[in-house]
Image (tube, rainbow, N blue to C red):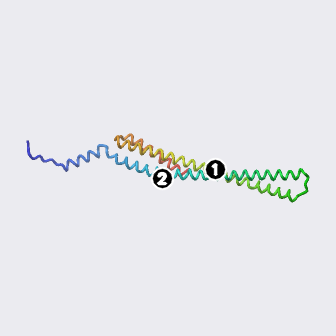
Amino acid sequence: MPENIDVDTDNLRERIAEEHEHSGEAWIRYVGLSAALFAVIAAIAALRSGDLINEALIHQIQASDTWNEYQASRQKEHIYTVAADGLKDSGSHNSARLHSYNAQIAKEAGKEAPLASKARALEEDSAGEVARHHAFEYAVALLQVGIALGAVAALARSKPAWYVSLASGVIGIFFFIKGFTL
């Protein structure tokens, strides 16, 4: 056997590195990048989702308060109407009191339309915020699925799993963008 075997290790290392890149394993580094991108977007979507549901709740409470004020105004109007009708029915000649009751009836009736309009607007705001909240919730869920499938793809060295991961992430990003446009 020859005692001195010269092996060109530099050339061998280069060929191994080239083979490793061309063997299809280079895509693994992109799995991590896609997962990181999905994680950032999911974090933003989760924060926005929480903000929106809180805003929706506040607007719904304000709408409820406004509807309560509307009902109180209608009850006052009814009480003053009953009192005015009672004066008329009794034949009272107290026109100052009747005029006062009629003024209160007009005042309370005048409050009703604006209160109802304000309450409806608050309810619409709340409903819109809930719809946007749901879009961000869907985004978070789909992005988390994309991250999990990306991890499975990297561990199992499965490109099809990564493609499904990317599809899930892209759909999640669609819902993320939709949350801002609703």
Disc 1 marks a residue whose amino acid type is Glu
Q: Amino acid at mark 2?
A: Ile
Give percent across and percent down for residue 32.
37, 48
Q: Nearer the viewer, residue 135 or 10?
A: 135
- Please indicate whether residue 71 sits to the left or right of residue 102 in the image: left
Placement of 15 over or under 110, stated as above or below: above
Query: First in sequence: mark 1 or mark 2?
Result: 2
* In front of the other: 99 or 76: 76
Q: Residue at coordinates 76% horizontally, 55% vertically from top-left? A: 108
Q: Is residue 20 left or right of residue 110?
A: left
Q: Which residue is mark 1?
A: 123
> Relative to residue 53, is residue 35 drawn left or right?
left
- Distance from disc 1 to disc 2, alpha carbons, whole Å, reads 26 Å
Of residues 74 and 117, the one drawn nearer to the viewer in this rendering = 74
Residue behind mark 2 = 44
Q: Secondary structure at mark 2?
A: helix
Badge 1 element: helix
Report if the CB atoms under discs 1 and 2 are less than 8 Å apart.
Answer: no
